Image (tube, rainbow, N blue to C red):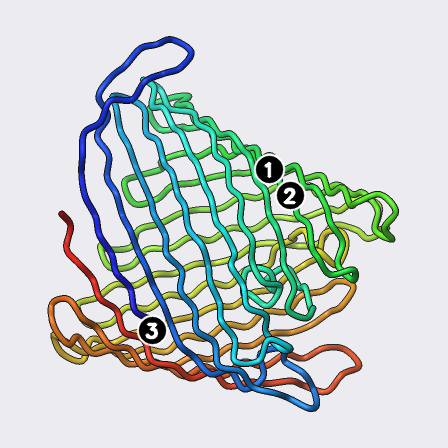
Amino acid sequence: MLALRTTGIATAILILPCSGMAYAATWQTAIAVPSTVEYDSNPLLLTSDEKGVTRTIIAPDLSLVGTSGRDEFQFGLGVYVVRSSDTDIVSDREDPRLKFGWHRETETGGYGLTARYEESSTLSTEVQETGVVASDGTQKLYTVGGNWRTALSERTTLLNETDYTHVTYDIPTLINYDELASRFTLTYAWSERVELFTRIGVRRYEPDEGTVASSSNSYTPTVGVNFLISEALKGSVYAGVNQVSGTGDGPTGEGGVNLQYTGERFETSLDASRSTVASGDGGFVEADNLKGSVSYLIDETRRTGLDASWQDTKGQTPNTLVNYSAWVSQELSPFWNARLFFTYKERKQDSLPDASANVVGLTLTYSYPGL
């Protein structure tokens, strides 16, 4: 991966169209242009007649964050460009990514709005986390949402997040759908190191008309605790249940645990969870996830690490996806860093043989200090 990053701070005049008022805003700019070349021995994770491809990926991204008084504005613009050595297996792509956010702080909390549009391959990790199994197609995701936070007392805070998501696919085996989700979270600061919380989430799944899937609702009450053991070790534990309407099944357990340790040389994290997510296979699906990573600073210029993930998704096409990755990085100069990586991935699916693939690549990163 070759990345060019530029950051800067500037002051500009922001004019509000509806009022004609103008006031100064301070903007921070970040520009990243990462590119990578990798070889994947089986990108489609086929069980026979596997074919490998070499991919060249470049993903320029521009981010703007502006602050003026109590207001913060966020803008993002990017594109994910892929060139494949065999377009019959993996298509050439130009996937745009747009985002916008606005947040205002108040004396007792804050509120804001968000919007996002993103295109991605159905082979991407973000799509496959919903249990989708498909050839190289395109998912288009549109999301708009709002949030607010208010302090009920010195230690108690109430938060709401509400989002509307519209998802479409260009593959006939996958189902376009809308999802409306709202989450209320009540937190209580027990101490400087312990925060208790309870959350209830409600979601509505609406598939396209004429599909085999049906509408359903998901209800998920949860309780948990965030904790800080030391400056180096922190984490959270939570548990709850989920009930999906229209399935005829009873409630199922949900929950998870997350731990993060950051030492002078070692950095490690562990995340285990069970959740219910909307899927292009139709309706809500249950997913079990286990992710872990560890890295070690060999000396001032070298670091090595291991990453692993395991995902078991239950739905129309139950499958298990496993990834292992090893890497080593070398700082070549204050501006250049080299990273060599190897990844092994495997998928197990009902009634099919196991499928696996190897991915190897070299990453070069050029970083430019802020202006």
Q: Amino acid at mark 1?
A: Ile
Q: Indicate whether 341 appears above or below 98.
A: below
Q: Which residue is mark 3?
A: 294
Query: Residue 311 or 84: which is nearer the viewer?
Result: 84
Q: Under tag 1, what secondary structure?
A: strand
The answer to whether 308 appears left or right of 9 in the picture is right
Residue at x 46%, y 83% (from the top left corner) = 39
Circle 2: is it few (<14), some (14-19), or many (20+) Cα within 10 Å? many
Q: What's under tag 2, amino acid-wise? A: Thr
Please report whichever mark, 3 or 2, sits nearer to the chain's N-terminal start: 2
Q: Contact, CB < 8 Å: mark 1 with mark 2?
A: yes
| Residue 113 in the image: above or below residue 61 | above
Q: How many other residues sit within 10 Å of disc 1, few (<14), some (14-19) or many (≥20)?
A: some
Q: Nearer the viewer, mark 3 or mark 2?
A: 3
Mark 3 nearby-residue class (10 Å; few <14, some 14–19, many ≥20):
some
Q: Position of residue 66 (x, y in %)?
A: 28, 32
Residue nearer the viewer, 179 or 195 = 179
Left or right: 292 as drawn, with respect to 311: left
| Whole-number angstrom distance, CA of label 3 to CA of label 1 | 33 Å
Asked if 336 appears above or below 46 in the picture, the reply is above
